[in-house]
Image (tube, rainbow, N blue to C red):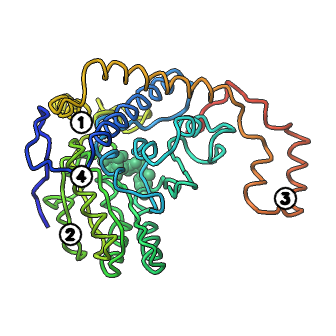
Amino acid sequence: MTSDMLQIISESGKALADDDTDLTEDQLVAMYEAMVRTRALDERMIKLQRQGRIGFYVPSTGEEAAQVGSGMVFESKDWLYPSYRVPGLFLMMGASLDDMVANCYGNEADLCLGRQMPVHYAFGKLNIVSISSPIGTHIIQATGTAMAMRMKQNNALTATYFGDGGTSSNDFHSGLNFAGVDKSPVLFICSNNQWAISVPIEKQTASKTIAAKAEAYGMPGVRADGNDVLAVYQVCKQAADRARAGEGPTLIELMTYRRGPHSSSDDPTRYRGNQADEWMERDPILRFRKYLERRDLWSQASEDALQQREKAAVNEAIKRIEKLPPPTLDTMFTDVYAKVPPHLRAQYEELVENEGTGHEADPDAAFPL
Ligand SMILES: Cc1ncc(C[n+]2csc(CCOP(=O)(O)OP(=O)(O)O)c2C)c(N)n1
Ligand SMILES: [Mg+2]
């Protein structure tokens, strides 16, 4: 148990602690690029929502280091139970921009075929399990998967992401309790962005830190500056190494701040002042950029090229995806059973007879939220 918070890069981009990292220069630059890509996607998607082109979005602006630093430690055999606020993690694990954008349109290119809420991604081939909208329910699922992986002795670990609000759920208790007893190979990654919609952290828990809660479950609890990508990487790497070595779970608290609204349906000016402003100065991307510049790994020219490249990549993905039609009606039936049973086949035929093929998109239809 600790109330200490690991920081490796200061706000001015100086290496504070021993930054004797095992990351190569290429990896450091790739991490920076992933952070910029995540922000480019977020900024564009929020604008699309405001233009009425998608119905809903959840921005993660200011939380990119938590996603990218942690995403560095996973292998393709690992299992991820994410929250809705980690688009950068998905990009790191191999999701394409097209996949991400298609989810928000819910059209025929959407891997969930429009059956999930927007930003509730699922990437089956990447072992990234569908996001649960009910807060916390995926924490026990992650523990269960980790227990299964331990039984299979395949050295795969499981990680789950949740917010400070998620730690108040019953499933947080059950998930950590079981994992502690079982010594399951699981990383419980809490992005403490200090708000759960309009509920501030001090109304969420009387505990001094979230990490402190780990002691009661018999596992280490560690804290890192969640806006410091190297500190995030280090605590996650140590936890992953422990889990793979059979030493059990870790609760990781990443201290960050939700700079934007909870979602595109939220207006934070109704419940908080200008607290977000001071967190602008702690911007994780700017901080890492200064660090890379100090190490001569980055320049204004590389920055300009990257910004242009990432924004163009997002725009191109939108251009490709936006014009696609909704999923056809038959997908309602064909993706449920390996072989469609006769009574569903009959229902399908009746539906097509009455409603058409499902390609007739209604541009005026209200978003159902
Ligand atoms: C069981 C349950 N209760 C309430 C909600 C409504 N809800 C959606 S997101 C959210 C806040 C979660 O905050 P936190 O866990 O801190 O994550 P963050 O959104 O800050 O990333 C709430 C209360 C829900 N989805 N599920
Ligand atoms: Mg939160």
Crowd around label 1: few <14 · some 14–19 · many ≥20 (10 Å) = many
- The answer to whether mark 2 is within 8 Å of ligand 1 is no
Cα–Cα span, label 4 and label 2: 22 Å
- Residue 269 left/right relative to 91: left
Q: Which residue is mark 1?
A: 284
**Element type at mark 2:** loop
- Residue 180 left/right relative to 365: left
**Element type at mark 1:** helix
Cα–Cα span, label 2 and label 1: 25 Å
At x 39%, y 59%, the residue is: 160
Q: Are marks 2 and 1 in contact (CB under 8 Å)?
A: no
Q: Is residue 196 visible?
A: no
Label located before the other in sequence (3 or 2): 2
**Element type at mark 3:** helix
Give the amino acid at mark 1.
Answer: Pro
Label located before the other in sequence (3 or 4): 4
Give the amino acid at mark 2.
Answer: Pro
Image quarter in which the C terminus is found? top right
Give the amino acid at mark 3.
Answer: Leu
Q: Which residue is mark 4?
A: 22
Q: Which mark is residue 344?
A: 3
Above/below status of 181 relative to 353: below
Cα–Cα span, label 3 and label 1: 51 Å
Q: Which residue is mark 2?
A: 220
Judging depth in this view, the residue of 127 and 365 nearest the camera is: 127
- Rendered location of residue 286, percent (x, y): 22, 29
Q: Are marks 3 and 4 in contact (CB under 8 Å)?
A: no
